[in-house]
Amino acid sequence: MLATVIGEILPLTLAIAVSPLTIVAVILMLLSPNARRTGIGFLLGWGIGIVVPVTVFVLVAGALPPKTGSDGPDPIRAIIQFVLAALLLLLAVVQWRRRPEPGAEPALPTWMSAIDSFTFARALGLGLLLSIPRPKNLLIAASAGMLIGGAGLSSASAAIATSVFVLCAVSTVLIPVVAYLLAAERLRAPMEALREWLARENAVITTVLLVVIGVLMIGKGLGSL
């Protein structure tokens, strides 16, 4: 059962892990003068911002009434999954409409220009702000929480599944930070090239991921009926 749940939540982690704006932010921090402090601070803030909501939704899902039978319908979870799917697809449409015109430079947040002066505390705060309040992350955390909390796992197994989700979701921030600590100078050029590409393709990447996850949630909702 645990392996099955982990297999179901792994695709969901992509929608958080492959977050172009977040990866651009951590790369800019790692290219800044205070890279070691701000990189670790941002990683901590980003991780906390993912742990908290997914844990809350796991607990909420676990508190819902159990199925009437092992193979019976589960209308409450089906409705929640359909609502989450609809919100994810709506967010995908919004992201697609916000994409830059062909040939136009992508508009980046103004706070990115101030990253060079960030302290550990400001980097941690930015990590929290880019994770907890964002609708996409909350919807994905809710989707994962519904899967984990509604699977009837033991507390230990649910904790393992949640940890796997969090670790995979933060991996695209964790890996650059650790890699920078080990080989800073060799990574500067590749990081700069990756930053430019992600900034340019942010809307397209996010839209595709949201559509895929939304369709997966529709399938889960149908499976609960």
Image (cartoon, rainbow, N blue to C red):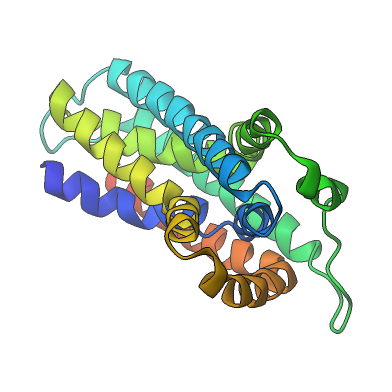
State the residue at coordinates (51%, 48%): 85
Q: Is residue 60 left or right of residue 212?
A: left
Q: Is residue 185 left or right of residue 76?
A: right
Residue 108 position in % (x across, y down): 82, 58
Residue 22 position in % (x across, y down): 62, 52
State the residue at coordinates (62%, 50%): 35
Residue farthest to the bottom, as pictured: 103
Residue 163 position in % (x across, y down): 29, 37
Q: Would residue 91 be visible to someone looking at this image?
A: yes
Q: Is residue 109 left or right of residue 123?
A: right
Who is closer to the viewer here, 125 or 198?
125
State the residue at coordinates (10%, 42%): 1
Who is closer to the viewer here, 195 or 146?
195
**Can you say whether 212 is above or below 50 in the image?**
below
Q: Count the marks: how many?
A: 0
Who is closer to the viewer here, 73 or 135?
135
**Can you say whether 7 is above or below 67 in the image?**
below
**Can you say whether 193 is above or below 67 in the image?**
below
State the residue at coordinates (84%, 46%): 114
Q: Would residue 151 be visible to someone looking at this image?
A: no
Q: Is residue 4 left or right of residue 117?
A: left
**Can you say whether 20 is above or below 71 in the image?**
below
Locate residue 179: give its quadrant: bottom left
For the C terminus, the quadrant is: top left
Locate residue 74: give its quadrant: top left
Residue 63 position in % (x across, y down): 31, 15
